[in-house]
Amino acid sequence: MSKLYRTYRIRSYVNASHAMRWENGTGEKHNHTWELICEIGINDEKMIIFNDIDKVIDGVTSYFSGKFLNDLPEFEDKNPSLENLTEILFKLFEAPLHEINASLIKLEVGESPTRFYAITSSLFFGEKQ
C-alpha cells in the first residue's frame, strides 16, 4: 500500500505594488493582487485548525500588504519580481508553520490569473528534512 500524505491547501491574496528594475532603468510602478496558494503538510498526522494556518499566513502577508515592494529591505538588492517574492515568502512561512507542527510543501504565487510561479519542497517527494 502506498504512503499517504495529508495536506491543506489555503488560498489568500495580498495587494502590493512593484516596479521592475531593468538594465535601462526602472519600469512603471503598478499594482497586483498577488494570489498565494499554500499547500501545507501535517508533520504528525494530527489535524490542524484552519484558523492557526490562517494566522501564520496573515502574519507573513500583512507585512507586504499595501506596500511598494521596491521600498522593502528584502528587495534592496533583488528585483521585486514574481519569482523573488515567491522565494522570500516561502522562507518566511517555514518557521511559523513549523511552530504549529506543519511544513510548507508547495507555494504558488500569481501576479495575474494566468501567470504563476511555484516552489515545491523536497518534502513533497517524501524526502526527510
Image (cartoon, rainbow, N blue to C red):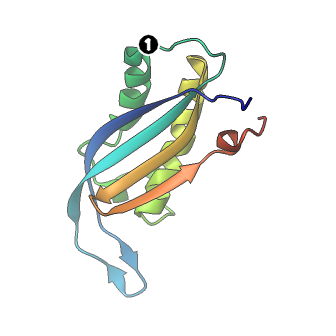
The C terminus lies in quadrant: top right
Q: Amino acid at mark 1?
A: Ile
Q: Where's residue 115, x and y in %?
A: 34, 64
Q: Label 1, on which residue?
A: 49
Q: Where's residue 48, x and y in %?
A: 49, 14
Q: Quadrant of residue 23?
A: bottom left
Answer above or below: position of 28 versus 36: below
Q: Residue at x 53, y 43 (%)?
A: 106
Viewer-closest of 94 and 35: 35
The N terminus lies in quadrant: top right
Instruction: Say whether residue 106 is left or right of residue 13.
Output: right
The furthest residue to the right: 128
Answer above or below: position of 50 versus 41: above
Q: Quadrant of residue 101?
A: top right
Q: Residue at x 41, y 64 (%)?
A: 81
Q: Residue at x 35, y 55 (%)?
A: 110
Answer above or below: position of 11 versus 119: above
Q: Residue at x 55, y 17 (%)?
A: 100
Q: Where's residue 8, x and y in %?
A: 47, 28
Viewer-closest of 43 and 86: 43
